Image (spheres, grey):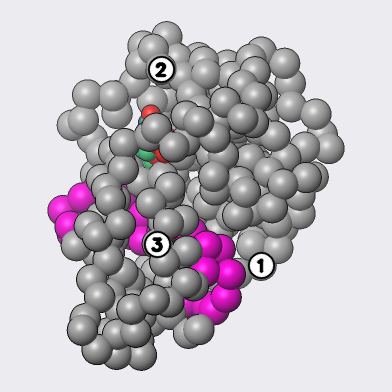
């Protein structure tokens, strides 16, 4: 099985899946991680198998096909950095699914997306508290879904597609002061992995600042949709690419190498 680092090189958002059910083996690791993450306060994930959930979405939006399995990412409204944590741990679920040969796509379903054309097309039960499968507490909301499924694209082809995806360049994602050491492989590898990270509407709104001996991750476009989810995703990619360290939560959270 491929590593999470290899999964970063292979992952692209997949919206059309074949109609075969996912083999249970391929979901085992994802399931185990979900159990682990659900011990943390403020966030939780639920894995759902619902053949009909995306049917209206599919027909109207026209982009998603055969989404029968997906993860619902839920947060407590008053919990610190909970969206960022859903991004960070949710992307670990995404990369684990990719490493197991599955296709994935993040789907934003938060209330502040109301007004965007496609929002009305998402089935109501995944936008409000009347969901028949996911029971939400009063202080919870669904933040995102992660679609999962089987794809008929070979690994090599995925790598080619992944390299072709539109992305900002290295310099746009970094700010390195003259005081920072220049040729730091771990930092460069971290940024290279962030360049391949998913972000809502591909806005890539996070940059990484290297100042003296300190690296931190900063939101550059606070208006961007679901920017905190993107922050968590970008931080995870950086850490996997750098192959070391851990992050403080929050905007301008520091990387402890
Ligand atoms: C938080 C978040 C929400 C997203 N929401 C949607 C969505 O609602 N519909 C969709 O088709 N893609 C969605 N995406 C996928 C992005 O469009 C995609 O990651 C981006 O265009 C980069 O392409 P790539 O993932 O293939 O590298 C979302 C991604 C993120 C991170």
The range drawn in magenta is 221-247
Q: Residue furthest front?
A: 183
Badge 1 local density, few (<14 within 10 Å), some, or many (20+)?
few
Q: Is the C-beta of the residue carrying label 3 under 8 Å from the nearest atom of ligand 1?
A: no
- Residue 242 to residue 160: above or below: below
Q: Position of residue 127 (x, y in %)?
A: 39, 36
Of the residues tagged 2 and 3, which is closer to the observer? Answer: 3
Q: Position of residue 48 (x, y in %)?
A: 64, 35
Mark found first going from the N terminus, 2 or 3: 2
The answer to whether the residue bearing label 2 lies less than 8 angstroms from the nearest atom of ligand 1 is yes
Q: Residues within 10 Å of mark 2 (few under 14, many from 20)?
A: few
Total number of numbered labels?
3
Residue at image position (48%, 84%) is 256
Is residue 139 magenta-colored? no
Residue tagged by mark 3? Answer: 191
- Reading the image, the residue beneath label 1 is 39
- Above or below, 135 relative to 148: below
> Disc 3 vs disc 1: which is toward the camera?
3
Q: Is residue 251 visible?
A: no
- Identify residue for label 2: 63
Q: CA distance from mark 3 to mark 1?
A: 30 Å
């Amino acid at each position: 099985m491929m590593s999470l680092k290899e999964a970063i090189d292979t992952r692209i958002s997949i919206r059309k899946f074949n109609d075969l059910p996912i083999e249970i083996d391929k979901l085992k690791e994802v399931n185990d991680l979900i159990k682990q993450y659900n011990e943390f306060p403020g966030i939780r994930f639920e894995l759902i198998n619902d053949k009909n959930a995306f049917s209206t979405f599919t027909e109207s939006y026209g982009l998603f096909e055969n989404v029968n399995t997906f993860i619902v990412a839920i947060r407590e409204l008053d919990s610190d950095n909970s969206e960022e944590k859903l991004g960070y741990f949710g992307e670990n679920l995404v990369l684990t699914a990719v490493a197991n040969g599955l296709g994935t796509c993040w789907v934003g379903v938060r209330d502040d997306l109301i007004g965007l054309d496609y929002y009305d097309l998402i089935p109501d039960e995944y936008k409000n508290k009347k969901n028949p499968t996911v029971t939400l507490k009063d202080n919870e909301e669904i933040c995102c879904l992660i679609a999962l499924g089987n794809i008929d694209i070979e690994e090599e082809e995925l790598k080619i597609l992944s390299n072709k995806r539109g992305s900002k360049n290295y310099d746009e994602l970094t700010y390195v002061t003259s005081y920072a050491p220049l040729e730091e492989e771990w930092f460069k590898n971290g940024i290279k992995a962030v360049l391949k990270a998913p972000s809502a509407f591909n806005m890539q709104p996070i940059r990484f600042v290297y100042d003296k001996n300190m690296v931190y991750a900063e939101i550059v476009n606070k208006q961007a949709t679901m920017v905190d989810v993107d922050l968590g995703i970008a931080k995870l990619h950086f850490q996997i690419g750098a192959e070391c360290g851990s992050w403080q939560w929050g905007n301008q959270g520091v990387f402890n190498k």
